């Protein structure tokens, strides 16, 4: 009789199960996102301007009262292209393009959030009905 060397991942002990490992990483990451715990000290951020970091930091505030609004984001020097190194004059067309693109990105994000909330609600209903 031949013996198989294949082992189903789900049959491995929890310590050796890569699925559990990735589930745990995902949980930790989600907890950090929800608590607003992040760092820009990693070398991936070395080439990112301080203006961009400032804008991102203000958009990632967990407390909505502290978080930058869409209007504030559009006026942020990094988004608008204004900085202390230029005279502050940006062609209106460039500002319009940036404004339109940012609004599109924000609308896509909001749409994604609505879809995720609908999926969570549906999963909750299914889970509740199963019990």
Image: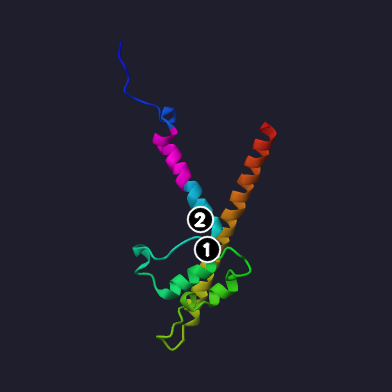
Residue 18 included in the magenta stretch of the image? yes
Residue at figure coordinates x 44%, y 75% from the top left: 51
Indicate the quadrant containing the N terminus: top left, top right, bottom left or bottom right. Answer: top left
Q: Which mark is residue 2?
A: none
Near mark 1 (Cα within 10 A), the count class, few <14, some 14-19 or many ≥20, is few
Q: Where is residue 69 shown, x and y percent of the image?
A: 60, 70
Residue 53's image quarter? bottom left
**The C terminus lies in which quarter of the figure?**
top right
- Residue that numbered label 2 is attached to: 32
Indicate left or right for 58 with 122 as reference: left
Determine whether, in the image, residue 131 is placed left or right of residue 4: right
User: Dots 2 and 1: beta carbons under 8 Å?
Assistant: no
- Mark 2 or mark 1, which has the lower sequence index? 2
Residue 119 position, x and y percent, is: 61, 45
Residue range (magenta)? 14-25
Residue picked out by circle 1: 105
Q: Position of residue 68 (x, y in %)?
A: 57, 71
In the displayed structure, 54 sits above or below 108; it is below
Total labels: the figure holds 2
Task: Write the residue at 44% across / 34% down.
Answer: 14
């Amino acid at each position: 009789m031949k013996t198989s060397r294949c082992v189903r991942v789900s049959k491995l002990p929890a310590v050796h199960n890569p699925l559990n490992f990735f589930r745990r990483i995902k949980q930790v990451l989600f907890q950090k996102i929800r608590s607003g715990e992040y760092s820009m000290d990693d070398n991936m951020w070395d080439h990112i301007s301080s203006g961009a970091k400032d804008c991102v930091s203000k958009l990632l505030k967990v407390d909505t009262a502290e978080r930058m609004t869409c209007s504030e984001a559009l006026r942020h020097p990094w988004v608008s292209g204004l900085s202390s190194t230029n005279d502050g004059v940006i062609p209106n067309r460039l500002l319009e393009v940036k404004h339109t693109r940012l609004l599109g990105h924000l609308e896509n994000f909001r749409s994604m959030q609505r879809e995720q909330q609908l999926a969570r609600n549906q999963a909750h209903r299914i889970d509740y009905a199963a019990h």
